[in-house]
Image: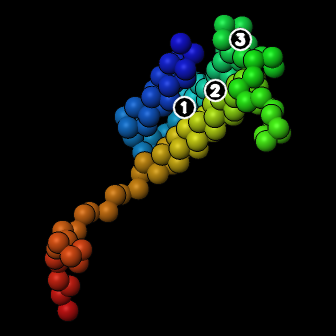
Amino acid sequence: MTLTIGVAGVGAVFFHSKRRPVGAPVTWGEAMAAAVFAFLLFFWWYGVIPHQWLTWADNELGWTVDNLLVESTGNVPITISMRVIRDFVVLGIYGLGIALHIGLFAMWQDRAKERPKAIPASRYGRPLVRERS
């Protein structure tokens, strides 16, 4: 449920960036609402979602230090518990959150740039348009 809310927040920013006119003046109230929403997304992606995952993995799934994934043997001198996997999942959540935030910031800043027109190409990859001299 928490991941669904986080993705919905990212989607809201994505759809609002398509509707907001480029260069439109921003009022004080709009700026404050955007700042509160950005803080809410940061708090959600880096606080709530990882906390809910850690709580679920510890309590419901039982991924503790006692639950071993790989046990040390004579040939493999390493022990990996399910707590390590739990922590790697949290690392992935943080990585996804930072990638989404950087992507949204870049998308918002680049929304005014014109996209280059596609030039038709031959089946060999060369442009079909001749330059006039």
- Residue 116 can be seen, yes or no: yes
Q: Amino acid at mark 2?
A: Trp
Q: Identify residue type, mark 3.
A: Gly
At x 48% / y 45%, what residue is drawn?
107
Q: Quadrant of residue 37?
A: top right
Instruction: Give coordinates of residue 40: x percent, y percent.
Output: 63, 23
Which corner quadrant of the image does residue 17 belong to?
top left
Q: Residue furthest bottom?
A: 133
**Of marks 1 and 2, which one's residue comes earlier in the chain?**
1
Residue 38, given in percent of the width and then of the height, sits at: 61, 29
Q: Nearer the viewer, mark 3 or mark 2?
A: 3
Where does label 2 land, which residue? Answer: 45
The residue carrying mark 3 is: 62
Q: Could you say which is closer to the camera, residue 79 or residue 118?
A: 79
Crowd tier of the residue under label 3, counting other residues whose Cα lies within 10 Å: few below 14, some 14–19, many 20 or above = some
86 relative to 128 in the view: left or right: right
Which colour scheme appears in the figure? rainbow
In the picture of the structure, the residue carrying the numbered disc 1 is 27
Q: Residue at x 65, y 29 (%)?
A: 89
Q: Secondary structure at mark 2?
A: helix
Name the mark on residue 106: none
Find residue 130 and report its horizontal and vertical position in percent: 17, 83
Quarter of the figure with residue 133: bottom left
Q: Cα distance, mark 1 to mark 3? A: 50 Å
Give the mark nearer the N terminus: 3 vs 2: 2
Answer above or below: position of 83 versus 19: above
